[in-house]
Amino acid sequence: MRYMIIVKASPESEAGAMPSEERLAEMAAYHEELAKAGVLLDGSGLKRSAEGWKVQYRGGKRQVVDGPFTEAKEMIAGYTLIQVKSREEALEWTRRFPNPRGNDLDCEIEVRRLFELEDFEPKEAVQRFRDIGMGGKEG
């Protein structure tokens, strides 16, 4: 089972502020624990929305909209991907995730399970994803 730990954007991250050395050290220690346990797949921070864009699909047309975007609480500032054997194991790891803003500031992370190719009926389109190495492995 793969899970994405989603770090929500904050006013600081949207302003382009870099994490403090203390915050980076906490995150590094946590990710080192994930790696030692063999459950870490990937993780990274995202640059502020002012450096990104959205593609909106409306009425059969596509439109590119440049950032910044107004609702910081709706945006993602970073993520960590883990692969674990159960929801309970994922829950235990995420309970230990360091507060991205620091222990004295309000913050939240969101955790979502990724689809595995095994979740879909075995059809040609699903096999095409498998052939290019997408979809993870059940674990």
Image: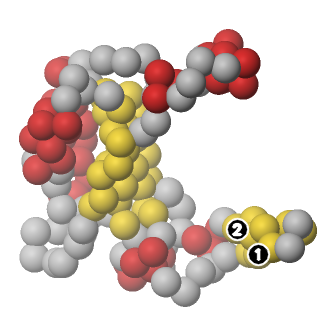
The one of 99 and 93 positioned closer to us in this rendering: 93
Q: Is residue 132 left or right of residue 29?
A: right
From the viewer's perspective, is residue 21 above or below residue 51?
above
Q: Residue at x 16, y 78 (%)?
A: 105
Give the residue number, with chain letter if any, for mark 2: 54
Residue at 59% over, 18% down: 122
Amino acid found under the numbered disc labelled 1: Val
Location of residue 63 in the rendering, given as x and y in whole percent from the top left corner: 84, 71
**Left or right of 53 on screen, residue 42:** left
Could you say where residue 51 lies in the image, as x and y percent from the top left?
Answer: 65, 68
Residue sitting at 47 percent across and 70 percent down?
A: 75
Q: Say above or below: 129 vs 45.
A: above
- CB under 8 Å between callouts 2 and 1? yes
Crowd tier of the residue under label 1, counting other residues whose Cα lies within 10 Å: few below 14, some 14–19, many 20 or above: few
Q: Position of residue 83 (x, y in %)?
A: 31, 27
User: Which of the image's four quarters has the N terminus?
Assistant: top left
Judged from the image, the secondary structure of the residue bearing numbered disc 2 is: strand
Q: Quadrant of residue 3?
A: top left
Mark 2 residue type: Lys
Q: Nearer the viewer, residue 10 or 73?
A: 73
What residue is rendered at 46% in x and 36% in y?
Answer: 115
What residue is pinned by disc 1? 65
Question: How many numbered circles does the render carry?
Answer: 2
Say whether disc 2 or disc 1 marks the residue closer to the N-terminus. Answer: 2
Q: Is residue 110 above or below residue 4?
A: below
Query: Relative to 52, is 22 on the left or the right?
Result: left
- Give the farthest residue toward the bottom: 70
- Out of 121 and 19, give the one closest to the viewer: 121
Q: Quadrant of the C terminus?
A: top left
